[in-house]
Image (cartoon, rainbow, N blue to C red):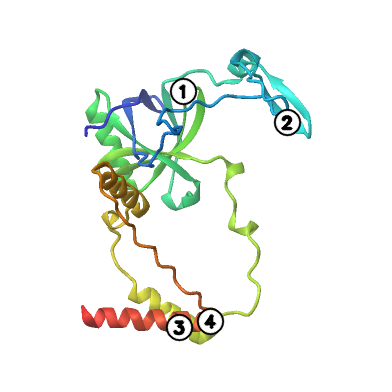
Amino acid sequence: MAARAIWKGQLTLGANKVPVKLYSGVVDRTVRFHILDEHKTRVKQHMVQPDSGDEVTNEEMQKGYEIEPGRFVILTEKDLDELEPKPSREIEVAEFVPPEAISQQWYERPYYLGPDGDEQAYFALAEALQNREREGIAHWVMRNKRYVGALRAEHGYLLLITLRNAEEVISARDLPKPAGRAPTQNELAMAKQLVELLEGEFDAADYKDEYRERVMEFIEKKAKGKKPRLQAVKTKRKVSSLDSVLRKSLESLRKGKRAA
């Protein structure tokens, strides 16, 4: 299926402007169900007043932010419209930084940027980013929302990844400090061996949504009038000793390597 552009704009780097099209870099494959009644008719959701059960119409609804229990600040649609950023078609690149300057937890959603006319300028920028090993910090407004993102080169094309806001990212320094005893030298040595034995190449095709596949297979069989049975998913027994876990893991991996 051919990718479809969802937005158009232009990359701005100082005085240089590169027209681009924006494509979603991921697809939502979540299994979604319709809510039906006993007659297989779709049911509708309604907003109701919790005390009386009376339905609340769209005209009666308000948006409120609770500042303390039972106390709300009401915002009208006009208030919200005035707070929205001004529409723009520019993706402004403010600076370029090394890739390691941005922690993985900041990345949120990827988009591809494709050329929208001036292909030479587009691919020249992509190649420059690839060769210099740099990521651009970009700012833009799309669909009434302001974004910050990381601009990078990916297989000769430009990839724009939205970044989370600072108040959304939790630093490792905020996590509770380790409690209990420190790992022994024997445990550290076995952990190192375990990492070495598991070294390999990442293949995205190996990682699938097994739950979705099981659900869709079940649905397809039921649609054909069959009565499928699903095997129970086995749960692993808990082992309390770290030393024991590492030892068993190493033995299992070594047996697998010898068999291969």
Q: Which residue is nearer to you in this view: 229 or 131?
A: 229
Identify the secondary structure beneath mark 3. Answer: helix
Is 171 drawn above or below residue 162 in the view shown? below
Q: Which residue is mark 4?
A: 241
Q: Which mark is residue 66?
A: 2
Kindly report which numbered mark, 3 or 2, lies closer to the viewer in this rendering. 2
The disc at residue 34 is: none
Q: Amino acid at mark 3?
A: Ala
Residue 234 found in image quarter: bottom left
Mark 3–mark 4 contact, CB under 8 Å?
no
Quadrant the C terminus occupies: bottom left
* Image coordinates for residue 116, horizontal then vertical, percent: 27, 24
Say which residue label 1 marks.
Answer: 143
Q: Earlier in the sequence, mark 1 or mark 4?
A: 1
How many marks the image carries: the answer is 4
Q: Taking 58 as reference, is 105 above or below it?
A: below
Give above or below for 56 relative to 126.
Answer: above
Q: Residues within 10 Å of mark 1 (few under 14, many from 20)?
A: few
Q: CA distance from mark 2 to mark 4?
A: 47 Å
Kindly identify which numbered label has been placed on residue 189. Answer: 3
Reading the chain from its start, which is encountered first: label 3 or label 2?
2
* Three-letter amino acid code at the position of disc 2: Glu
